[in-house]
Amino acid sequence: MGPVEVHKENIMKVSMPDNQLTIKGRVRLIFEDVKTGEIEISEWIENIIPTVGRTAIARRLRNVRTKSNEGIVTYGAVGTGSSTPANSDIKLATELIRKTIASSSNADNVVTFRIFFTTSEANGTLTEFGLFGEDASVSADSGTLFERVLFSKTKTSAKTLTIESQITIS
């Protein structure tokens, strides 16, 4: 069989939409006054998923197994730092307290984490929040930072605080 001739008129052009994977996060704060039952819910605040968080998710997809709880979020932390969140972040600027995830759920491509602080925890002016996992413990600055966000809210001992964090993969 001889060489195959290809004519320009026989070449089909295929146009495909860009298939871009996006990972984004958002956080809201829910305060409940323990005496009156009044509930205050903040607007959703967009956050950043830093490079170390995206890398952890990729490792989990491959099942690399280089860290305990690889790619899994286990703690939420609040702090008092004010530096602008950046892709290079690996911790909160000034972590105040962290708690284990109280509950988590997912629907379609959105995972929601909830972290609960009692009336005696995290009192003062809070300015930052982050999700941590992998080699994380109750110790400040431990583990992998999965997200970070800035805000400014004051919590008192008259209120509990639930932080809802959603990560959407689309």
Image (tube, helix red, strand yellow):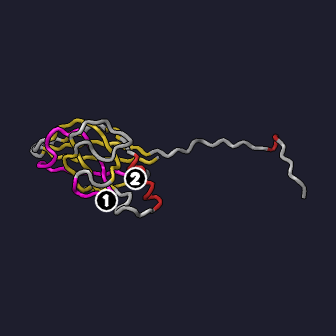
Q: Secondary structure at mark 1?
A: loop
Of labels 1 and 2, the one closer to you: 1
Magenta residue check for 132: yes
Give above or below for 80 relative to 69: above
Give above or below for 110 relative to 149: below
In magenta, the rendered stretch is: 111-139
**What amino acid does circle 2 point to?**
Ala
In the image: residue 20, left or right of residue 105: right
Q: Name the residue beneath numbered marker 1.
A: 135
Residue neighbourhood size for the residue with mark 2, other residues' Cα within 10 Å, grouped as few (<14), some (14–19), many (≥20): few
Q: Quadrant of residue 11?
A: top right
Q: Quadrant of residue 68?
A: bottom left
Point out the residue furthest to the right here.
2
Give above or below for 92 relative to 103: above
For the point 83% across and 46% down, the residue is: 6
For the point 25% across and 46% down, the residue is: 163
CB of mark 1 within 8 Å of CB of mark 2? no
Residue 25, horizontal then vertical, whole percent: 37, 44
- Measured in 3D between alpha carbons, the distance from the residue under mark 1 to the one under mark 2, in whole angstroms, is 26 Å
Whichever of callouts 1 and 2 sits on the residue coming sooner in the sequence is 2
Give above or below for 107 relative to 24: below
Residue 148, horizontal then vertical, whole percent: 32, 43
In the image: residue 135, left or right of residue 126: right
Residue 139, horizontal then vertical, whole percent: 22, 55
User: Which part of the image, by quadrant, shows the N terminus?
Assistant: bottom right
Q: Name the residue beneath numbered marker 2.
A: 107
